[in-house]
Each structure stands twice: as C-alpha cells, then as structure tokens.
Image (cartoon, rainbow, N blue to C red):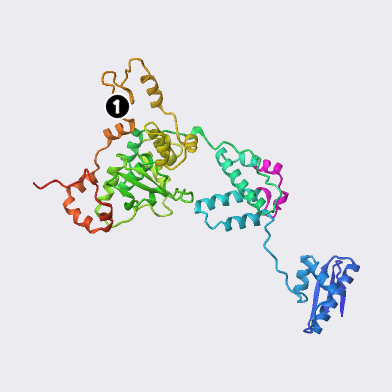
C-alpha cells in the first residue's frame, strides 16, 4: 500500500514500499489532495503489477502513456516505469541551428565559421529556446535593424542571406509554416568606396619591398595573375606550370563544388614568368611539389604581412588588400580581351565581374580624350598613329612592366650557375615532367 504525506510548506509526496522491500518517495510538489490520491491509486497498481510480475491493465497503461514528462521522470526514478527516450528537440532555434550546421559535413572551414557567426547573432537576439514557429516577419525586421546598428551593410546582407537559408531548411522539414526572413530586404553588398585600382607603378614598388622571392611571387600572382589569396596560391604546384605552352593551371578550392569550377587555365603572363623562374631554379627547392612552401602554416597571416610590406614600400594601403589586386587585373585585362575570356581566366562570371570587380580608371578618361580626336593625335596608351595607322603604345600594364621588370639577382645567379644546377634538375622527376623553361634560361653554347 502507498500513503500520502504532506510537508509543512504544503508540498505533497507519496510513500510506498517497492518490490525489493525498500521504502521510496515520489515528491509531487504543490498539488491538490484529490490529484495526489488519484496518483496514489496508480502507484499502487504499478507496484502490484511489479510484485506479481504481470503487465499493466489497459487503464493504467493509458495513464502512464499520457503522463507529462516531469511526473514520468519521477516514476522512472523509483523504477515504477521505464525511462522515456527523449529525442533531441529540433523545433527550438538553438537545437535546429546546431543540428543544421553539424549535419553539413561538406562545409569548408571558413563557411562553417560564417554559419556559426550567423547562429550567434540569431540566438543572441531571439534566445536559444525560442520556438522556430513563433518567430514572425516583424521580429525578423527588428533583428535586421539591430544588426544595422553594429555591422556594415555588406556584412548585414550576408547575415540576412544565411538566416534566410537556415529557415528555408526549417520550412522544408515542415518545422515552420513560413520563412519569416523571405521578404527581408537585404542591404547592398557593393561598397563603391572600397573599390581601388592598383596601378603597375604602385605594385612594382610593393614587389620591390617584399622580403623574399616567395613574397614577390605571392604579390605578383595576386596582381598580375588574378589569383584568390591564399587558397589558390597555396594550391599551386610545379606540375601546374606548362612552360612549353605558356599556361598555368589554377586549382580553386572555393569553386570546386561547382561543375567545372575545380580549376581553370590562365596564360603564363610575362609579368609572372621571371618570378616563377626564380623559384624554379632555386637549388634548395629541387624536388618540392608546391610552389609556395614557406607560408603554408594555418597561422600564417598573409594580410598582416602584406600590410607591413606596403608600409615598407612607402605606399598607402588600399581598402581590400587582396581583392583589389584581383579586381585591378580583371579591369586591366578587360580593356584588351573579351569579358568572357577574362572571366574564364579570373574564375568568375560576367555579372559578378560587373558588380564587384570592374572599375573606371584614370586611363579610361585619358583614353577618351585622346582617341576620339578627328586627326587621331595623341601619345597616350591606346592611341593610333595617324601616319602609320598602328598602335602608338602597348597595353599600359605590359609597357610599365616591361620598363620596370629586370631580372632579379636570384635569376641571374641561377643562369650563371646553370651548369651546376642542370644535373640536379635532371635528377628530379618533377623537373622531367614539367620540362625546363624553353626560353630565356638556356645555357650558353660552349662553341
């Protein structure tokens, strides 16, 4: 038999003798006497069934099934009923976002970090235990306004897009009836004030101020190759350089999940070749696979180091250190080649190039007032000689690079010692596979 006890504070409890002979207590809290008596009757039924080794009657079984979790947990704690298996809730904001991010096993590290930042912003505003279905479009507007007070417009736009993605997934799982972020207006991601064209004169000063040959190549690949830094620089291997056909295969971790986006082929631009040759003929690098070897550590902060180099060069830093270099190259190349060709080399699309990369430069204004004169006069780049009908000047980037580019000391030393380096080069499988550069570095004839 069971009995009902009452504490001085009005809380009630049920005392009973378990089948193993031990006295046990179920604390009910502040409940009416009638409710306590009804529970006592069911407890006696459960104890009797346990003692007899038989199942519950239908009425008791239904009563147990309908119990709230709190009372069911108390009965399970005294071994009267099995402990309920609780599934991880996914209808609350925190639980859903945790499950969504952890379930995306294919996320790249940077993407996962971005998702976690958006999760933090959502949870800080709405609360971790907030039900997904309770978040309204009006509250989404309030969340947007809160972000605008502390983040840039471009960052806010990315946060909104990720929040919309999260809740779209919740909608597909039938956890919510509508996506409260669907109609949320996103601020413009394009910040024209951060667009900056880096001229060849500026970048040559920066290259000259670099501490070593690898840094000179990193800067050159960014400005004249249009590579994404650091992912595409660090993925570059000697086997990707086709010296004979003057082409370089660029592997892109950022776009590899798109069809055909795992790599692209760019020309071995004349601005790139001498810097690649310098490292190619470096005696210490014989047998290495990757071109960039010294800055592969995850903790290597290339942005901070580039700022120091720019300061050493006596140049004012531009707003977006690596993106502005890439955008400058695309702008420059688009003046010479069709946009679809340049996009193929840079690794983006025409709409993206138009929105985030292409710029109007001072040279465009200069060309506009020199090439449209009736007589065809003018000496600026791109003008036509009235007498010969030929171009008076080369493409500005090539002209400037040709004037300023001289062989580095490392390259001259390598050429002077070619006879010493040749046996090592021939012994290296990677050199045999790539072949030595066909021009500009041949040993002098002994005849």
Q: Residue at x 58, y 58 (%)?
A: 103
**Residue 129 located within the stretch drawn in magenta:** yes
Q: Quadrant of residue 225?
A: top left
In-front residue for pair 308/232: 232
Instruction: Determine crowd level at label 1: few under 14, some 14-19, many 20+ residues with C-alpha closer than 10 A.
Output: some
Q: Is residue 18 visible?
A: no
In-front residue for pair 211/200: 200
237 to the left or right of 252: left
372 to the left or right of 178: left
Query: Where does the image place residue 255, in percent across and percent down from the top left?
Result: 46, 48
76 to the left or right of 58: left
Query: Where does the image place residue 120, in percent across and percent down from the top left?
Result: 61, 50
110 to the left or right of 198: right
Provide the residue span drawn in magenta.
Answer: 125-143
Q: Which residue is mark 1?
A: 393
Q: Quadrant of the N terminus?
A: bottom right
In-front residue for pair 399/194: 399
Badge count: 1
- The secondary structure that most of the magenta stretch takes on is helix
């Amino acid at each position: 038999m069971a009995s009902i006890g009452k504490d001085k504070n009005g809380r009630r409890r049920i005392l009973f003798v378990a089948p193993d002979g031990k006295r046990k207590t179920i604390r009910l809290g502040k409940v009416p006497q009638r409710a306590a008596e009804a529970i006592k009757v069911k407890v006696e039924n459960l104890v009797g069934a346990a003692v007899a080794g038989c199942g519950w009657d239908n009425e008791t079984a239904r009563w147990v099934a309908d119990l709230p979790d709190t009372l069911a947990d108390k009965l399970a704690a005294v071994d009267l009923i099995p402990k309920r298996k609780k599934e991880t809730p996914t209808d609350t904001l925190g639980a859903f976002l945790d499950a969504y991010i952890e379930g995306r096993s294919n996320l790249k590290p940077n993407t996962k970090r971005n998702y976690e930042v958006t999760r933090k912003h959502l949870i800080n505003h709405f609360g971790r235990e907030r039900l997904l279905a309770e978040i309204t479009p009006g509250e989404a507007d309030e969340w947007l306004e809160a972000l605008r007070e502390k983040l840039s417009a471009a960052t806010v736009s990315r946060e909104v897009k990720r929040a919309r993605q999260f809740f779209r997934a919740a909608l597909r799982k039938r956890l919510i009836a509508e996506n409260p972020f669907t109609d949320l207006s996103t601020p413009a991601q394009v910040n024209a004030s951060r667009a900056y064209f880096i001229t060849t004169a500026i970048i040559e000063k920066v290259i000259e101020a670099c501490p070593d040959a690898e840094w000179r190549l990193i800067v050159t690949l960014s400005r004249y190759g249009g590579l994404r830094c650091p992912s595409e620089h660090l993925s570059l291997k000697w086997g990707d350089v086709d010296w004979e056909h003057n082409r370089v295969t660029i592997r892109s971790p950022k776009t590899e999940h798109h069809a055909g986006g795992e790599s692209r082929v760019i020309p071995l631009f004349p601005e790139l070749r001498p810097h690649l040759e310098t490292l190619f003929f470096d005696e210490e690098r014989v047998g290495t696979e990757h071109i960039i070897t010294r800055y592969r550590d995850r903790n290597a902060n290339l942005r901070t180091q580039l700022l120091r180099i720019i300061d050493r060069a006596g140049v004012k830093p531009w707003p977006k250190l690596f993106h502005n270099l890439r955008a400058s190259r695309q702008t420059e190349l688009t003046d010479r080649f069709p946009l679809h060709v340049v996009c193929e080399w840079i690794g983006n699309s025409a709409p993206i190039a138009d929105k985030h990369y292409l710029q109007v430069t001072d040279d465009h204004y200069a060309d506009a007032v020199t090439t449209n004169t009736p007589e065809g006069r003018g000496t600026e780049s791109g003008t036509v000689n009235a007498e010969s009908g030929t171009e008076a000047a080369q493409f500005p980037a090539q002209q400037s690079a040709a004037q300023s580019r001289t062989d580095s000391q490392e390259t001259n030393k390598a050429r002077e010692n070619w006879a010493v380096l040749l046996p090592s080069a021939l012994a290296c499988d990677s050199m045999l596979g790539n072949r030595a550069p066909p021009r500009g570095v041949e040993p002098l004839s002994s005849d």
